[in-house]
């Protein structure tokens, strides 16, 4: 099962929360936290052997890479990264 099939399986038939402005299927989610305030949320994972190998990257390099991926997703949604 690929990533998109899993997402379809997990989300089929569910009722979306009205506070969710941008739902599953984009770079990141956008939710309304209070009236007039929205937050962009991103959570990508990296899997050893798929996205990196420990014999070629130091732990701090893996951390930098996963942070860069998530910051990129926030920026793609027009957000300003503030927390990690």
Image: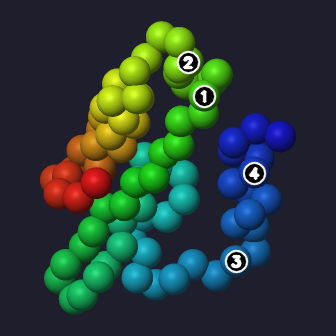
Element marked by disc 3: loop
Q: Is residue 39 visible?
A: yes
Q: Residues within 10 Å of mark 4 (few under 14, many from 20)?
A: few
State left or right for residue 40 relative to residue 3. Answer: left
Q: Left or right: where does residue 51 sit relative to residue 30? A: right
Residue 53: assigned label: 2
For disc 1, the neighbor class at 10 Å (few under 14, some 14 to 19, many from 20) is few
User: Mark 3 sits on what residue?
Assistant: 14
Q: Nearer the viewer, mark 4 or mark 2?
A: 2
- Whichever of labels 3 and 1 marks the residue nearer the N terminus, that label is 3
SS category of the residue bearing label 4: helix
Name the quarter where the N terminus is drawn.
Answer: top right
Say if mark 1 contacts mark 2, CB within 8 Å: yes
Disc 1 target residue = 48
Q: Position of residue 39 (x, y in %)?
A: 27, 68
Q: Which residue is mark 4?
A: 6
List the single residue furthest toward the bottom: 35
Q: Secondary structure at mark 1?
A: loop
């Amino acid at each position: 099962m690929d990533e998109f099939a899993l997402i379809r399986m997990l989300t089929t038939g569910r009722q979306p929360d009205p506070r969710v402005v941008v739902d599953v299927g984009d770079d990141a989610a956008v939710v309304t936290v209070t009236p007039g305030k929205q937050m962009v949320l991103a959570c990508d994972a990296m899997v050893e052997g798929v996205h990196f190998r420990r014999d070629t990257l130091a732990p701090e390099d893996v951390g930098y890479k996963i942070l860069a991926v998530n910051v990129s997703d926030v920026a793609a949604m027009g957000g300003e990264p503030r927390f990690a």
